[in-house]
Amino acid sequence: MKQLLLFTLCTFLFFSSFAQDNKEDADIIQAMYGKEKKTIAADFIILPDAKKEAFWKIYDDYETERKALGKQRITLLEEYANAYDTLTDKSTDAVIKQTMALQKSTDALIAKYYDKLMKEVGVKPAAQFYQFESYLLSVTRAYVMSNIPFIGELEKTESPKQ
């Protein structure tokens, strides 16, 4: 578990630079993240030899879909950062609704692949996949939320103009 925590913390160094990098750099970082993540998943998820090939095929399909959602999340964070100073009620509502939709999509994706894995490789490996992904997702969400200002937060800290 220490390896997983260290990996997650190192990943945040990459994620913190996402909003400033171009799309090609984001693709490279996501590919590196995916390879490291897969290595740690292989240590965490216990698979019978007869089920390994089926598991990793499904897992790779999951990663392809997860990365697409990750790109959407990065784009939304960039839009939020770029518009932070000029957010209106309408644009704030749009950001929040997009955030909620992405969270629902991500949670639904994990559930979809849990079901696929359960049918193909059994309950225990599917449950380990679910725990692994949920843990990384929770830590990532907490990290992002702790590193972006709340809407209106910076306005409170600005000194009044005289």
Image (cartoon, grey):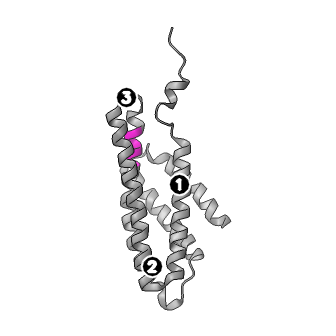
Q: Toward the viewer: 94 or 66?
A: 94
Q: Position of residue 158 (x, y in %)?
A: 53, 21
Q: CA distance from mark 3 to mark 2?
A: 45 Å
| Residue type pointed to by label 2 | Trp
As shown in the figure, which amino acid type bears the numbered disc 1? Thr
Viewer-nearest residue: 127 or 144: 127
Q: What residue is rendered at 40% in x and 51% in y?
A: 100
Instruction: Tell me if residue 39 comes above or below residue 21 in the rendering.
Output: below
Q: Is label 3 or label 2 in front?
A: 3
Q: Residue, x 35% and y 30% (percent of image)?
A: 88
Picture quarter with the N terminus: bottom right
Whether 27 is among the magenta residues is no
Provide the residue designation for mark 2. Answer: 56
SS assignment at label 3: helix
Please, is residue 102 above or below residue 89 in the view?
Answer: below
Q: Residues within 10 Å of mark 3 (few under 14, many from 20)?
A: few
Q: Mark 3 belongs to which amino acid?
A: Thr
Q: Give the CA distance from mark 2 to mark 1.
A: 23 Å
- Give percent across and percent down for residue 30: 44, 59
Residue topped by disc 3: 86
> Would residue 85 appear left or right of 3 to someone viewing this image?
left
| Residue 140 badge | 1
**Are the two marked residues, 3 and 2, in contact with CB atoms closer than 8 angstroms?**
no
| Magenta-highlighted residues | 74-80
Q: How many marks?
A: 3
Magenta highlight: main SS:
helix
Could you classify mark 2 by the number of other residues whose Cα lies within 10 Å: few (under 14), some (14-19), or many (20 or more)? Answer: some
Mark 1–mark 3 Cα distance, whole angstroms, equals 26 Å
3 or 2: tag closer to the N-terminus: 2
Q: Residue 95: image x %, image y %?
A: 37, 42
